[in-house]
Image (tube, helix red, strand yellow):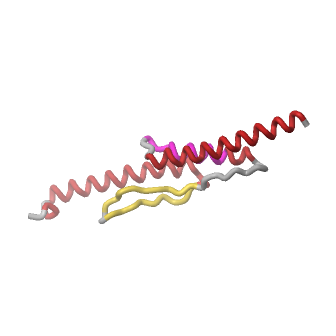
Amino acid sequence: MNLMNIPAFRNQQQSLVKKSLSDIYNHERAHKAAGGSLTGPIVIDWQNGIPVGGHVSISMPKLNPKKPQRTIDNANTVINSAMAPADPSSQDYKVANQAKAVKNQALNLQNKQKRVDYYA
């Protein structure tokens, strides 16, 4: 007997797929909303017609020695975007930590520049 031929089972499966898709989409939408112009489109990953995950690409800031504040601002946006969902994934934490490292480099550079300006 194929359970998919039983209407109640089929309806239950469809409800689970819809909930899963909604949960994944809401998670990715939180990233997108917080990341703004630094983010790409929402992508949902599917296997055998079932949503299994998703992602939103984001531009990781690079240290700009001439404009460390811009680097800091972009890093803060990436951190906020990565941590925006109510249930951040391990990948979300990894992205946030990478952005924090870049932010710290920019802060250090900014502090050095302020010291040089102070003593100049």
Q: Along the horizontal axis of the image, is 23 left or right of 97?
A: left
Residue at (51% x, 49% y) in the render: 31
Instruction: Please identify the residue farthest to the left as the structure is shown.
Output: 1
Viewer-nearest residue: 59 or 93: 93
Q: Along the horizontal axis of the image, is 41 left or right of 61?
A: left
Q: Which residues are magenta?
A: 73-86
Residue 73: where, in percent of width, then height?
A: 67, 44
Image quadrant for the N terminus? bottom left
Q: Along the horizontal axis of the image, is 79 left or right of 49?
A: right
Image quadrant for the C terminus? top right
Residue 38: where, in percent of width, then height?
A: 60, 54
Viewer-nearest residue: 49 or 115: 115
Task: Provide the major secondary structure of the magenta segment.
Answer: helix
Is 107 included in the stretch rendered in magenta? no
- Above-or-below relation of 63 to 5: above
- Above-or-below relation of 100 to 49: above
Please give the count of numbered marks on the rendered protein: 0
Residue 65: where, in percent of width, then height?
A: 76, 49
Q: Which quadrant holds residue 101?
A: top right
Residue at (55% x, 44% y) in the render: 97
Residue at (76% x, 37% y) in the render: 111
Residue at (68% x, 43% y) in the render: 105
